[in-house]
Amino acid sequence: MSRIFIKLLFLGIVFFSVSCSKDENENKVVEPDTIDEALTDTLGNKTKLFWMYLDYEEIPDALIATEAPRRDLVVLNAWFHEYVQKFKVVNPEIKTLVYKDLSSTRSYAVENGVDNEYLPTGVGYQYAITSHPEWFLLDTDGNRLEYTGYADHWQMDIGNTEYQQLWVNQVGDELVTNSWDGVLLDNALYTRDSYHENIFPMNYQTDEQFQAAYKSMFTKINTRLKIDNKLGIANLTNTRLYKGVWESYMELLNGGLDEWWLVFSNGNYLSDYAEGYTPQITEVATNEADGKITLVQPHSSISDDQGFYYAFASYWLVNNGNTYFSEQEVTDAYKDPSPWREEYTWNFGKADSNYFQVESGVFRRNFSHAVVLVNANETGSLEVNLDAPHLNEKGEKVSSIILEALSGSVLRKINDE
């Protein structure tokens, strides 16, 4: 294990890149040590990637042939169930999840008064409005609740036991019939006014009552999924703002998705404060300790190196093999796969321990073939001096780096022999 010494730099110094390097061999690119897979202490400890494809256009076979080997998990709409086998033929190990909204029914998924055969939800709008209008969630004036910003998404009473049972039966049967590995449960909500700020449902007086209804639903879903050996992963975005929600929901799930993980847009990164950086990476660490899946999605772009390495290094602070990564530049633009990067081929090797913080506040984790560092402070650059040479992200041999505020770095070890 290399020891590093870190000192705060004067704030007035200007740095011109995300992680500037003191280069021992300027412009000389050094190859990292080659790894004999038969002898290494871990086989293929590389980044796991997921792809959410929620568009309506067909996926070309050529794109599946290219992307299936690169991705470890894919989420698709229900009407694309024939792609399950197409992905599996190219990559038998890939996990395939069907998208289903927990909390709404969709009036756009009706044609000529008949619900579509394959739905983005668990219960059809036409069936509900005709047979069970009491399943629709109402505000305090008795009006049905529609998602703000998402027309034709009608919120359902998640605590209604009949609604729960039909949702579970229909989705469970669909998973088995179409050979899905599991389901992505969108909109696992935890505040009563989600999607309609300051407008509250009639049936729930507190957020705690609302959360109890969701946990009741998760219990039914989990019971069915266990029988069929399927996965249930829920979208729990922003639960970092509400202490204990992630953990209490995860007790009844196989995993969670955080749609807004650390990087919200170019130049807009989550710093370390009470509801900030540490709570968000702790969600992942908690799931890893429990052997559960986490899907993390930073909103970085191919032009935003700082945002990418901030999220990528943070991913490796907490990933133990059950965490999946995907860049998503545009909100809800779930079509094209995230950009492919060479960094995804790097083998990090075995982690020496969990992540820790050094005295300056830098987060660090050591691997047998790499070191990752993150400065989650909102202000203040840090210089990190290494007592052994490493390769920076550009493949340059360096003895120290500058970590700007809200930046990360992945340094690979070198075999000089």
Image: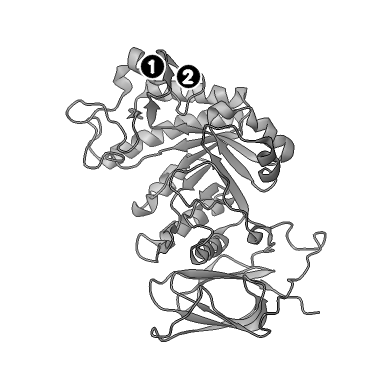
For the point 48% across and 30% down, the residue is 221
Residue labelled with disc 2:
116
Q: Residue furthest left?
A: 141
Disc 2 residue type?
Asn
Return the residue nearer the eye: 291 or 330: 330
For the point 50% across and 67% down, the residue is 306
Residue labelled with disc 1:
126
Image location of residue 207, percent across then percent down: 28, 41
Whichever of callouts 1 and 2 sits on the residue coming sooner in the sequence is 2
Figure quadrant of the N terminus: bottom right
Image label count: 2
| In this rendering, position of residue 252 left or right of residue 229 | left
Q: Callout 2: few (<14), some (14-19), or many (20+) C-alpha neighbours within 10 Å?
A: some
Image location of residue 178, percent across then percent down: 62, 25
Disc 1 residue type?
Gln
Return the residue nearer the eye: 319 or 307: 307
